[in-house]
Image (cartoon, grey):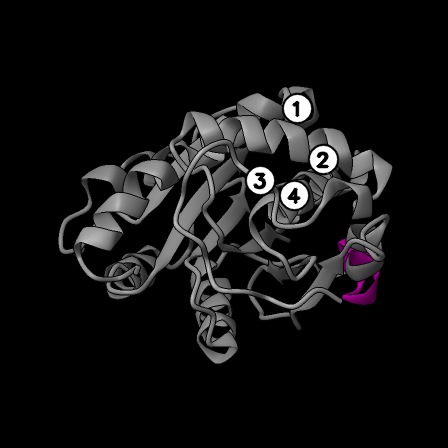
Amino acid sequence: MFNRKKSPAPSGPHTPAISLDKVPAPLVSLAKAATASLEKSGLSGLRAAVYLVVDRSRSMRPYFANGSVQRLTDQTLGLSVTVDDDGQVPLVMFDSRPYPIVDVSLDRYQGVVAQQHQLHGGDHTMGGTQYTIAMRAVIEHYLNSQSSDPALVIFQTDGTPQDPDDVCLQLVQTSKLPVFWAFCGFGPGKVRFLTELDTMRGRLLDNASYFHAGADPRSVPDEQLYDGLVGEFGKWVPQARAKGLLP
């Protein structure tokens, strides 16, 4: 597997962290779309540790069934190879309970969502929507990794958390860390809780964004999705540097 290296200073056109000739063919077009979005957001040259959090609550059944969750997983791995040279994305599934983190990698990504979903009991065991379980798992994993790069956490959900106060507390606490939460909403309507994050008080920095992918996330063009995921991240990076969170 690939070894993580220290982030270079952003400069010029974005060079993928992993050469595209080492990337499986189905992911190459995703990596190219991600690269275009990174350049558009002023993130050329940036390296980051990419995480994917997936909502496994009961209302997510159709999105597991129709491939929307697997598609987002593929898109996240496509983004990861442009900014993270270890060739893998930690996948965190959550509902009312924590689930073990598994690595989605270049040689193990196809069908991984269905495999993990069934491993956890399939549709019959899907629970509620408690964000904090997943947030804590991500933070623990990131801190233990001792990465010198910021964490970009793509956090997929289709509903309001059942633990909103704890989520707000986690956002406040993690605003002092080099961690950015890029929330990605599935479903016909926006999640009001997530739309209000930009105005949430008490944080060192605005460390979260929200992109709504709609009722059919598979129909969203790749570059539009990436624009939505990294746009505010591109604004956060220089602010985090100014606060001493990043070198």
Label 1 element class: loop
| Three-letter residue code for mark 1 | Asp
Q: Which residue is mark 3?
A: 15
Q: Of the two numbered discs 4 and 3 on the same chain, state the one appearing first in sequence.
A: 3
Please identify the quarter of the rendering in which residue 16 is found.
Answer: top right
Q: Which residue is mark 4?
A: 60
Q: Which residue is mark 1?
A: 216
Q: Which residues are magenta?
A: 117-124
Outermost left residue: 202
Mark 3 Cα shell of 10 Å, populated few (<14), some (14-19), many (≥20): some
Question: Separation of disc 2 and disc 1 at Cα?
Answer: 8 Å
| Three-letter residue code for mark 4 | Met
Question: Separation of disc 2 and disc 3 at Cα?
Answer: 28 Å
Q: Of the two numbered discs 4 and 2 on the same chain, state the one appearing first in sequence.
A: 4
Q: Is residue 232 left or right of residue 94?
A: left
The reply to whether residue 200 is visible in this rendering is yes
* Quadrant of the snapshot with the C terminus: bottom left
Front residue of 124 and 243: 243
Q: Position of residue 99 (x, y in %)?
A: 64, 70
The reply to whether residue 215 is visible in this rendering is no
Q: Of the two numbered discs 1 and 4 on the same chain, state the one appearing first in sequence.
A: 4
Magenta-span inclusion, residue 1: no
Residue at the image point whose x is 14% and y is 49% from the top:
201
Question: Separation of disc 1 and disc 3 at Cα?
Answer: 31 Å
Mark 1 Cα shell of 10 Å, populated few (<14), some (14-19), many (≥20): few
Question: Separation of disc 4 and disc 2 at Cα?
Answer: 10 Å
Mark 4 Cα shell of 10 Å, populated few (<14), some (14-19), many (≥20): many
Q: Of the two numbered discs 2 and 3 on the same chain, state the one appearing first in sequence.
A: 3
| Three-letter residue code for mark 3 | Thr
Q: Is residue 231 left or right of residue 169?
A: right
